[in-house]
Image (cartoon, rainbow, N blue to C red):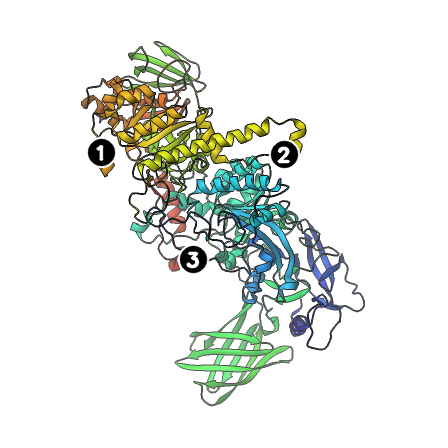
């Protein structure tokens, strides 16, 4: 647009905004003169990007009544249309945000209430015929609660957005999003589509109901709700009314959007979608580049934020030490995330979420382009992709005949720093974003006001003017300068005197003259004049970004934290020679022996072995043992306790965190595998996860494939809420706990009868019968009764252990393990008779009342009685030296060193039904071994190499190398971050501290 037409254009914008649209809702009462004139405008001589891959030079855009009539080259203006000359300007389709909260009521979350210490809320408090769980809010309709926010809409428009799919982010099932235009009209005229997507999350939101309180509980609730919806929808005569499930069924054909906060929760979401045969569009966390191949394998569309982390203030050396390497690397590599998705052909849209990122959106979008994202993909992700996924591509996403006239006007290439959005047109109405500067104003002037004479310089910086005075003595003063329409306004201070000037402009011999009146120190009027003596041009100042692009970028680590590696660790052939081998088999301890590991298995044991292309490790003076197995652990999990009395439906495998540094620490202690258990808050806890600590793999890669499934039960004070005097949760006594177990198994048997009756029906009868409701909790209980799932029971006192054995025998199955089992020595004979094992501590007891009768002789007594006995950690710290815990058994009870070592290797393998592949060094077993610097039970010995399935996951020498490399990488990143613009105003930040979980933990990992 030529600057000489500025006033006319601004005047036009005002007229357009004041006119009543011919598309206004006719049913509304009118209180003015009818204005039915059509809005007919032609924008000419522009570069028009009609679609991400289609550009028209010197073209015109014809719009009428909020719609595009045509887009074409040439500039023959049709009759009856107002022409706006946009020479030098660019036109793009306005952006569409698929994930916003615009115009929705604020979500006010209640303060956290510890259900262990307060009165429980077991039932929903939602009034009306809605779902039994408060977090299921599928009935919510965003369009019914949408209100226009003009101030906020202007902020969206300033970043290029013309429409947003808005949702209230509250609950696990959140209801439907509405697509709304970002104009300043009535809600009726701005709602483009009242329902464009069905939303879900892993966040219970404002629900105060106890269940769920954990991430695995959230997943279980969502899974059960999807099963319930299917069953409820199949009813011909529903036994009850559930408006939440009604809404879920009614919205079943809408796109399903799941909010995830990172790649890990994205994988969890995709697993749910696969179970139910649909596809989530997953709103990611911006860290997908950290596990890009796993994200690609999901084959799920993504919505990604570009809220790149701010640089840290690294001036304080003490605080700097508390910034993790992972956070430093994410600061550097986060801008590569969009390009990483594009290069791996992962479909994605870009969102401005979170709301506080909105003012930085364009800046970060351009930064993404600087870091490798193509401009085509950038524009697609904000136009055609969201339009298609939301099912509105017939109306939005491109500039074509018949589509909505939603577009932005820029003064250059949108993706280049410094380019300004001048206007954002919404439904054919223009909204000014940046008032264009007038080039006729730019230049140097001789200023005269009162007795002051100076040179006034005015330049353009983006959409703003920048001015300064040069006084006769050569000194300079800043000037606040702006144009109020065509009226110049100046404010400055010289030698303590304040000048406030305002006037008008005129042209004399092709040069601009500014003159008018003003005040000196708010006193009498002062005439002033500024005559241009030299013309100038505005310099479109580039928006400053934190760096100039992907220069000197570090590598992605697996896992993405200290001690990770650029490549995932792979299995290889390894020959360990002349080593002392603790076989845990009949052969006992073998001296000066060779062991060959091939294809992830123990291939040969003997002397003078050789193998082509094998890595040869000299074992002289060293010891080789089976890898340590921890029967009871809570590391590498995103949560520990769910609060439902029977939490058997939750699965710990759903919340495995493969990036927990506790895994690496465990490997450094020779631990190769563990049972990751639910906590002890409930009589029946969640399903266990059996894992191998394959550092760098994802959650699925850690799981031991083909392992028998286990579940956590709990006895004692925790499940009775003994510390809570106001508790109303059943059970509250030892008798109640016994009855609780009886009820759970009885209900499962009744459930089985119902399904057996249905399955016995003939084909014809099934056509008219309704399939019984699938209950994932009863399914789990049935697995126990059918001896397909095995119980690990948290226990302390003998009387409670005796009770649970009696319940199990009554229902025809045997318990697998009593874990802790501090009074197991009292009933070891009964345990052997029942067939249950014991997994205990070496010498930890009396840390609470029910643990007062423990003894370090517990494990040896149970072992000698014939009970399969193991030592466990229940601690991320203790896990690192389970070999020392085993060594104590030589002192307490006089076990032989081999017997003691079996308590942390072969015996836990037997308890976890893994002894056919793990726990001893035998040809054909999994190559899960540890090479020690000396006797494995010595305080002075260290694991030199921890090997899982033939892959070296911990290496003492490599550990020292990684420490040096990590230190060097930290120094590089801190130096890169030091002194960056803006960091001096950033408050000192440190990284969040990871939590260490134990049986009673209620916290969730961030």
* Residue 374 location (% of width, % of height): 59, 47
Direction from residue 938 to residue 40 in the image, left or right: right
Q: Residue furthest right?
A: 79
User: Which of pointers 1 and 3 indicates the residue nearer the eye?
Assistant: 1
Q: Write down the quadrant of residue 875 in the picture.
A: top left
Q: Badge 3: how crowded within 10 Å, few (<14), some, or many (20+)?
A: few
N-terminal of the two: label 2 or label 3?
2
Report which residue position mark 3 lands on.
981
Residue for badge 1: 845
Q: Badge 1: few (under 14), some or many (20 or more) residues near its Cα, within 10 Å?
A: some
Say which mark, if any, is on residue 769: 2
Q: What percent of the width, then of the height, locates residue 289?
A: 50, 41
As measured in the structure, the alpha-carbon distance from the residue carrying label 2 to the one carrying label 3 is 69 Å
Answer with left or right where residue 104 lies relative to residue 881: right
Tell me which numbered mark, 2 or 1, is placed earlier along the sequence. Answer: 2
Nearer the observer: mark 2 or 3; the answer is: 2
Residue furthest bottom in the image: 524
Q: Please determine whether, in this image, residue 391 is positioned above or below residue 424.
A: above
- Pointers 1 and 3 in contact (CB under 8 A)? no
Please, is residue 588 above or below residue 529 in the view?
A: above
Q: Quadrant of the C terminus?
A: top left
């Amino acid at each position: 647009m030529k600057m000489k037409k500025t006033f006319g254009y601004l005047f036009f914008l005002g007229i357009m905004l004041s006119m009543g649209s011919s598309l206004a809702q006719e049913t509304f009462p009118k209180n003015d003169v009818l204005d039915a004139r059509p809005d007919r405008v032609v924008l000419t001589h522009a570069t028009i990007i009609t679609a991400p891959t289609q550009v028209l030079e010197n073209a015109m855009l014809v719009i009428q009544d909020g719609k595009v009539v045509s887009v074409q080259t040439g500039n023959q203006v049709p009759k009856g249309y107002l022409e706006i000359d946009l020479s030098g300007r660019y036109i793009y389709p306005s952006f569409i945000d698929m994930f916003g909260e615009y115009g929705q009521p604020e979500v006010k979350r209640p303060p956290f209430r510890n259900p262990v210490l307060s009165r429980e809320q077991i039932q929903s408090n939602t009034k009306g015929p809605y779902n039994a769980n408060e977090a299921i809010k599928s009935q919510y309709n965003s369009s019914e609660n949408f209100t226009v926010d003009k101030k906020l809409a202007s902020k969206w428009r300033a970043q290029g957005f013309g429409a947003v799919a808005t949702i209230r982010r509250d609950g696990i099932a959140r209801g439907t999003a509405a697509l709304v235009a970002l104009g300043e009209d009535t809600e009726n005229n701005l709602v483009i589509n009242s329902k464009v997507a069905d939303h879900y999350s892993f966040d219970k939101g404002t629900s105060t109901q106890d269940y769920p309180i954990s991430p695995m509980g959230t997943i279980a609730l969502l899974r059960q709700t999807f099963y319930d919806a299917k069953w409820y929808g199949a009813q011909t005569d529903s036994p009850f009314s559930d408006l939440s499930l009604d809404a879920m069924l009614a919205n079943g054909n809408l796109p399903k959007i799941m909010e995830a906060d990172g790649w890990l929760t994205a994988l969890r979401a995709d697993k749910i979608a696969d179970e139910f045969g649909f596809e989530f569009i997953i709103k990611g966390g911006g860290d997908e580049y950290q596990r890009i191949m796993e994200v690609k394998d999901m084959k799920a569309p993504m919505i990604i934020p570009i809220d790149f982390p701010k640089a840290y203030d690294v001036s304080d050396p003490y605080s700097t030490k508390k910034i993790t390497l992972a956070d430093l690397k994410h600061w550097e590599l986060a801008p590569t995330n969009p390009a990483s998705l594009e290069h791996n052909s992962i479909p994605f849209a870009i969102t401005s979420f979170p709301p506080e990122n909105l003012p930085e959106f364009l800046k970060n979008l351009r930064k993404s382009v600087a870091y490798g994202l193509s401009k085509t993909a950038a524009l697609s992700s904000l136009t055609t992709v969201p339009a298609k996924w939301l099912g509105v591509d017939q109306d939005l996403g491109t500039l074509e005949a018949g589509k909505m006239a939603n577009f932005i006007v820029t003064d250059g290439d949108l993706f280049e720093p410094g380019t300004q959005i001048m206007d954002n047109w919404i439904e054919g109405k223009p909204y000014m974003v940046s008032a264009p500067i007038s080039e006729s104003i730019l230049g140097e002037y001789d200023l005269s006001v009162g007795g002051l004479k100076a040179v006034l310089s005015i330049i353009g910086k983006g959409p703003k003017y920048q001015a300064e005075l040069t006084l006769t003595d050569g000194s300079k003063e800043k000037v606040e300068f702006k144009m109020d329409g065509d009226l110049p306004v100046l404010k400055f201070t010289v030698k303590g005197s304040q000048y406030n000037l305002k006037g008008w402009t005129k042209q004399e011999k092709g040069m601009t003259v500014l003159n008018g009146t003003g005040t000196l120190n708010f006193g009498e009027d002062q005439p002033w004049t500024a005559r241009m003596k030299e013309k100038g041009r505005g310099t479109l100042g580039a928006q400053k970004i934190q760096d100039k692009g992907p220069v000197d970028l570090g590598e992605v680590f697996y896992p993405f934290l200290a001690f990770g590696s650029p490549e995932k660790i792979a299995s290889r052939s390894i020959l360990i020679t002349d080593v002392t081998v603790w076989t845990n088999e009949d052969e006992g301890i073998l001296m000066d022996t060779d062991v060959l590991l091939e294809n992830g298995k123990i291939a040969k044991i003997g002397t003078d072995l050789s193998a082509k292309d094998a890595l040869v490790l000299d074992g002289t003076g060293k010891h080789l043992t089976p890898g340590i197995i921890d029967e009871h652990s809570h590391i590498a999990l995103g949560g520990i306790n769910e609060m439902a009395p029977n939490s058997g439906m939750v699965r710990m495998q759903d919340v495995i965190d493969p990036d927990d540094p506790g895994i690496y620490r465990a490997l450094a202690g020779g631990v190769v595998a563990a049972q990751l258990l639910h906590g002890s808050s409930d009589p029946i806890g969640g399903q266990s996860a059996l894992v191998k600590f394959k550092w760098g793999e994802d959650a699925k890669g850690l799981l031991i494939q083909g392992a028998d499934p286990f579940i956590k039960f709990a006895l004692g004070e925790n499940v009775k809420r003994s510390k809570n005097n106001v508790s109303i949760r059943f059970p509250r006594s030892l008798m109640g706990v016994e009855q609780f177990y009886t009820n759970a198994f009885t209900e499962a048997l009744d459930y089985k009868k119902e399904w057996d009756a249905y399955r016995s029906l003939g084909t014809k009868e099934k056509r008219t019968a309704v399939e019984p409701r699938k209950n994932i909790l009863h399914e789990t209980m049935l697995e126990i009764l059918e001896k397909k799932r095995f119980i690990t029971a948290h226990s302390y006192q003998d009387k409670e252990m005796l009770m649970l054995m009696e319940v199990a025998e009554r229902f025809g199955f045997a318990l697998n393990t009593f874990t802790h089992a501090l009074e197991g020595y009292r009933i070891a004979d009964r345990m052997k008779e029942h067939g249950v094992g014991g997994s205990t501590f070496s010498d930890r007891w009396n840390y609470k009342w029910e643990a007062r009768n423990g003894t370090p002789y517990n494990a040896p007594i149970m072992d000698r009685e014939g009970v399969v006995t193991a030592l466990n950690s229940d601690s991320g710290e203790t896990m690192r030296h389970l070999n020392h815990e085993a060594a104590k058994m030589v002192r307490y009870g006089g076990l032989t060193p081999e017997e003691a070592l079996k308590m942390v290797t072969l015996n836990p393998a037997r308890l976890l039904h893994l002894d056919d592949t793990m726990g001893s060094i035998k040809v054909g077993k999994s190559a899960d071994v540890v090479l020690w610097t000396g006797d494995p039970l010595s305080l002075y010995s260290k694991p030199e190499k921890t090997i899982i399935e033939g892959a070296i996951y911990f290496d003492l020498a490599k550990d020292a190398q990684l420490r040096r490399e990590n230190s060097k990488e930290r120094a590089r990143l801190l130096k890169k971050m030091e002194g960056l613009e803006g960091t001096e105003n950033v408050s000192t930040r440190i990284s969040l501290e990871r939590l260490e979980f134990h049986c009673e933990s209620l916290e969730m990992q961030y």
